Amino acid sequence: MPRIEFQGVTKIYPDGTRAVANLDLVVEDGELLCLLGPSGCGKSSTIRALAGLEVVSEGVILADNNRIDHLPPQARDCAMVFENYALYPHLTAFENIAMPLRARRLPVPEIKRRVMEIARMLHIEPLMGRRPRQLSGGEKQRVGIGRALVREPAMFLMDEPLGHLEAYLRIELRAEIRRLQERLGITTIYVTHDQEEAAAIADRIVVMSGGRLQQVGSFLDLLDRPVNRFVAEFVGEPPMVFLPVERTDTNSISVKGVPLQLSEPLAAALRATKDTNLTLGVRPNDISVVPPANEHLKGVVTLVQPQGSHAIVAVSTPGGPATVIVPSDWRPAAGANVGLAFAGERLHLFDSTARSLLHNREDSNG
Amino acid sequence: MAEVQLSGIHKQFGAIRALRGIDLVIPDGAYVCLLGPSGSGKTTLLRCVAGLETVDAGHIRIGNRNVEALEPFARNVGLAFQNYALYPHLDVRGNLAFPLRAPRRRAQFDDEEIERLVRSTAALLQIDAMLDKPVVTLSGGQKQRVALGRALIRNPTVLLLDEPVTHLDARLQHEMRVELKLLQRRVGTTTIHVTHDQLEAQALGDLIVVMRDGLIEQVGSPDELCARPATSFVAGFVGDPPMSLLQVRLEREGGSLSLRVGKTRLRPGERLARLLDGFRDQHVEIALPAEDISQGHGGDVQTVSGKVQAHEWVGRELQIAVMVERTLVRLRTQQRLDLRIGDELAIQLNLTRAHVFDSKTGRRLRSSPN
């Protein structure tokens, strides 16, 4: 299985749209990498360029240090699965999966063995005699995955493969995909707009926006060390809370007159900038609801949503709305006057260009 | 605004008995979620209240009227569906006004009145800026707001919602949940919301009705369902991840009771020992919340082990499913474990809060049988 490298890859469509801009990215041998971003961020164009379905405008793509971006698609040994299953309607599930092997003129017993082996892994053995219209959406996508993997490709590319499916099927099938990928050890790039899906299955996640790579890292890296406000806002559920900050002097800041306790690294990052247009970012898990007091930002609880072991509490504050995660056994009531305390060591500050004061200098390819 | 009373509701489709005797009282102004897997009868029940299905037996009372024999339009209910069911050729205004322009209502509303209602409803749902837009140009969340507005415009006595947010993406789902709940608080309309998503039901419902195979398993507040699930089915459905169900064998040696899972004998602890006093040599089913299952070897009798079936990051936590003696046990950990599917994992079970169920009936055990 190869290591894939994008070097300065840019894709400009004939209408002038710059879908991917100067992408540098390494996909390690055997890893499952998710490309995550909103629609139009360039994630699909990136894997289509790797598969050879799009010609790159600038830059090169390497597989184990060999240039592949000029090769025809069939010479790149990528298998691709799309959101719409693209099965042959007149063929049985068995024949759909067998298609790539027949095209290679493998001996019949060998074809049978390999199709049934992959069918077993995907738990669709009993369905092999059925045609696509006799299969459910989830079953069709399993057949699609089987067809992609049966010829043991070097790379496995998936473009929103679960987009059409019901929520419970998505959860079931993504676990299945991860299991299969681990078992086969195949280098996989998985495109999705759903962070829950990316978090669930990826070794590393690439966040993209406007054709540009924003950050690469594990899901926890993205949660705890977002390099800019886009990543901070896009990743994490419920989303990060943003509050406007007044800069009182070089060393200190406050939110609506309430001074913030900063960690030493954050205080140092603050001293290093003259920017006065700063925004505080804090995760709902890193805020506590406390009795109202002058040293805390005050607010009124607008809604409480129990979630089993915890509850999601919406609080209206003079700085704007805030969401807080509280443990179930200590839950305020709607309408209550409360204070909000922030976990000082987990705060984020964003400057007027939306970059994180603390994390923007880190190697974003971490 | 009204109380809704359902009594003895039965509904059959051919050989399928979709509803097998439903008795339920929904208090005036309550937000009630009907929760269950597909095929449990929750949507059929909603459709019966709406009048989209006729009941084979039983009574539906909305306020002080029996409505089971009435046509849907005469029941004064507002309906919103998963797929919005908007009229694609109309703009937002046209969709909102549609229920008011229905032939049977022509006499009721003049154009001026219709425009006034459209505007106040649009303002309520914050879609007043897009009244002239064709609905096909709207985002999923905006379409859902229009569908809700259409359901609310006639000021219905009951609002009926069928999976209204399920197919939106995760971020939008959470936003729409908040909007729905705040909206319902504002208008105060008795609301019945069908969902298969237990976290959605917990977030929204004053009361949750858990359904299974055409019957009600339990009615309770979100806290009640988690703290005292009435059946093992309910226990296996609630929690994040849902509670794990284990078949255990009770064994009594001398005076002491142990709960056997495979080869491991678990100590019951004081509360369970009291609950199970008098039970002997039989199987029971226990349910453990994910908070009471932890990864790691305690080196004592409360440790079991199994093979990792799945592992996923959910927020800051790793959720792990482990097969222990043919049962899937689900737990969460904040540790960064490098797990592979098939790895052997030791886990510790804390039984102090375990729920115990009769393994034949699935009902919660309340006291000893003798």
Image (spheres, coloured by chain):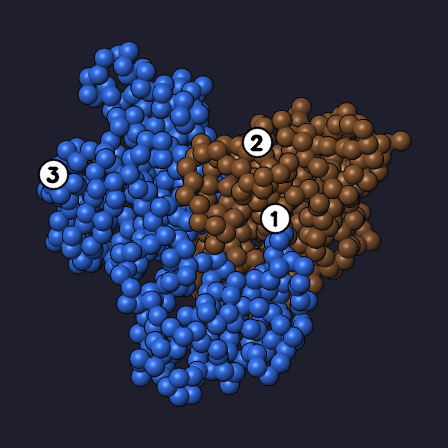
Chain colours: A blue, B brown
Q: Nearer the viewer, residue B32 or A285?
A: A285
Look at the numbered disc 2 and give the secondary structure of its residue: strand
Mark 1 and mark 2 residues within 8 Å of each other at the beta carbon? no
Mark 3 and mark 1 residues within 8 Å of each other at the beta carbon? no
Type of residue at label 2? Answer: Val
Q: Earlier in the sequence, mark 1 or mark 2?
A: 1
Chain label for disc 3: A
Query: What percent of the width, then of the height, locates residue A358?
Result: 35, 70
Task: In the displayed orientation, state which residue is furthest to the bottom.
Answer: A249
**Quadrant in the picture for the C terminus of chain B:** top right
Q: Nearer the viewer, residue A66 or B119?
A: A66
Query: What percent of the width, then of the height, locates residue A90?
Result: 33, 22
Mark 2 crowdedness (10 Å alpha carbons): few <14, some 14-19, many ≥20: some
The answer to whether residue B168 is seen in the rendering is no
Type of residue at label 1? Answer: Glu
Q: In this picture, is B159 found above or below A271?
A: above
Is label 1 on the same chain as label 2?
yes
* Location of mark 3 (residue): A71
Q: Nearer the viewer, residue B259 or B13?
A: B259
Q: In this picture, is B195 found above or below B343?
A: below
Look at the numbered disc 1 and give the secondary structure of its residue: helix
Query: What percent of the width, then of the height, locates residue B36?
Result: 64, 40
Type of residue at label 3? Answer: Leu
* Location of mark 1 (residue): B291
Query: What percent of the width, then of the height, locates residue B267?
Result: 71, 37
* Location of mark 2 (residue): B324
> Marks 2 and 3: which is nearer the front?
2
Look at the numbered disc 3 and give the secondary structure of its residue: loop
Residue at the image position 66 percent from the left and 63 percent from the top:
A331
Instruction: Examine the image and state in which quarter residue A100 appears.
Output: top left
Chain label for disc 2: B
Residue at the image position 78 percent from the left and 33 percent from the top:
B256
